[in-house]
Amino acid sequence: MEKYKATLLVFGLVILQIILAGEGLYASRPSVHENTIAGSAESALPYSVKLHEKSLPQKDPPFLDKIIIVSGSYNIPDEASKLISYDENIYLFAVVKDARGNHYLGDDGFLPPRLKIGNKKYTITDESLKRWKKELWGPLEINWYRIMPRMIPSHPELEDYEWYSNVFTEGPHEGKFRAFAVIEYEQEPLAQKGWIINPKKEVGTVRFRVEVNYHGRIISSPGQEDPSQPHRMATNDYDKGIKPTLHRISRLSDHKNKLIRYTEALRGVPWCWGTAYKIAGKPDQHQADLANPISIECSDLIISALRAMGNKNLAYTSAPEMARGVYTKPIDERTFRLATLDIFEEWIPKGISFHNGFYYLCGKGKIKIFDLNFKTERDIESPSANYLDIAISKNGKIFLINETKNLEREIEILNLEGEVEKIIRPKVEHTLTLDGQIYTTQRELRPQGIGVDDQGRSIYLLASDSLYIFDLDGNLQEKIRLEKLYDSFVPVGNLCVKENLIYVPVYKKEVLVYNLSGKVVNRAVLPDVAFGLDVDQNRYYLAASSPFRIEIRRLDGTFVGDSEEKLIDQNGEDAVVRIGSSEDYLQVGDLILSGEEGEAISHTLVFYEDTNSNQFLDRFDKLIYAGHDGVMISTVEEKLGSRYFILKRIDRQTVKID
């Protein structure tokens, strides 16, 4: 009887458990999840999902047949590839599917409880999404891979062209479609593993693959590597380029200009001459389209960015068509090019002074005077002179150090017409102690650099590590020792004195700024050694070498302009392209279309940065464009050189750009 009662009691407890489970008994998960998200060994995710146990756990391990990448935030990640903003945080999740159609994400309650694959939502609450029962079925080994194209093919198809090309590169059919080039891809295993990764934040386009190893059986998402194929991936994932079935993340840059932000999302996409439609006439099937970018060419880069910004009706076009006005309007009707100048014609300048809008440079045999456009105004000839440095006072007197044929150094004072008004041979006292006796002698000073006060009443001479101040009669007024000269810094031999400050260029590509007590109060770094220097209105005016040129920089060392190159128009006239917000000025994001002399426009570039903020186009400013390394940034000088170019603006009445 007692045995019968015990049996009934156990049976009753089992029935009670089933009833309670059917009426909503819930189990909670632990509150700590260990993972390796973003370099953290322990990061709690914002979910603690209580599972509604409707059925007993499946003890037999599922038969896995698919692994899917979904991405996004923790809200509802989905399988779509993404074009994201620069600051957007992105997570990639691995979803495994078994032969029964069950989808699994994670092995605890701290990954998203819902996601979207295709048009269907999968959630933990309705059990269309499940957690992997690690304690019953064992762990899964999940590995991630980063997939990137080779920027240059390992075995070029064309002997005369080492990059990808869809067109003939020479001969009578040059530029005409030949065949789709085979783009090669390489895969790099990522350090992050498991159900979730937080990929490195990088501007441009990256594709990902994930694979799961369960009991020695490996299942991969699209993009599995296959070295036997010329493109180095499974044939199912390649068709005239990598297929859109591979999960892609394209990140915009943080550039201030919207067009450039989208342009830089194409970083990591290779150049291909003659990038083409995969399906003729369908812009979203173009090889450059950001829906699935495979390769880029110069004008394609612009159209792809504009289409991604919302201009879905734009068809891909060429640089010549843009030059003719397709989607563009002119900023300036002229054609421009950079011209190299040699204003010294093998004459070597040794000192410089800027006075009333003119550059005065001294050297052997003469003083050369240039206007603001570096055109020779006139020369002051002095065949027997070897001028080492020059200074000009505000009242228009020219002060020079002249090294005579006897290697003596004297100070010449000229008027602006070049007439000598005075010659001074500065002398300083020299004391000598001999047998207890002190002897005083006068010796001539051998100055290296010269400066003058604003009134032209005092002459400043640099000799060795000291500054000597003389009056106009050659009387020494004061000697100031300049700290750190020759102790740490060797002067190049020039000097400038302005507003009670002393400027001394040194061989460490710097300018030391002293007060009249000889203390260093400031320093400026220059890209080259300055062999002549003047200061006026917060600008350095420099005589620079390699090549010899006049250079203008701000007091912080940033470039303003120089005489090495200038901009000219199609008539050879000097030209200035202003940079600013005016409709008539060049703006960041505007197009520069270039071509070789005597040939049609062939290349499209975008104005990227007024590097020195001088508000006019010069060789140091930067351009962004599609080149052999993909999306590239170069200076105007590097990219344009002596090519001619025109300025175009995207027609805002035609496209969405704001």
Image: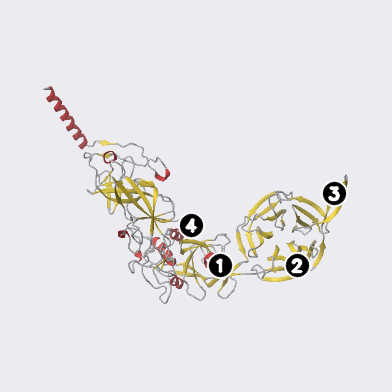
| Labels 4 and 2 touching (C-beta < 8 A) | no
Instruction: Tell me the residue at 58%/74% (across/down).
Output: 572
Mark 1: amino acid:
Val
Q: Position of residue 212 (x, y in %)?
A: 31, 48
| In the depicted structure, whether residue 625 falls above or below residue 22 | below
Q: Which quadrant is the C terminus positioned in? A: bottom left
Q: Which residue is mark 4?
A: 256
Which is closer to the viewer, label 1 or label 3? 3
Which is more N-terminal, label 3 or label 1? 3
Is residue 50 rendered to the left or right of residue 159?
A: left
Category of crowding for the residue at label 4, using alpha-carbon neighbours closer than 10 angstroms: few (below 14), some (14–19), many (at least 20): few
Mark 2: amino acid:
Leu
Is residue 61 rendered to the left or right of residue 80?
A: left
Q: Is residue 355 visible?
A: no
Q: Position of residue 222 (x, y in %)?
A: 32, 55
Category of crowding for the residue at label 3, using alpha-carbon neighbours closer than 10 angstroms: few (below 14), some (14–19), many (at least 20): few
Q: Work out whether residue 518 or residue 240 is closer to the camera in this orientation and state it.
A: 240
Q: Which residue is mark 1?
A: 577
* Secondary structure at numbered mark 2: loop
Q: Which residue is mark 2?
A: 416
* Secondary structure at numbered mark 3: strand
Which color mode does the image show?
secondary structure
Dot label at residue 526: none
Q: Which residue is mark 3?
A: 432
Instruction: Tell me the residue at 83%/59% (across/down).
Output: 473
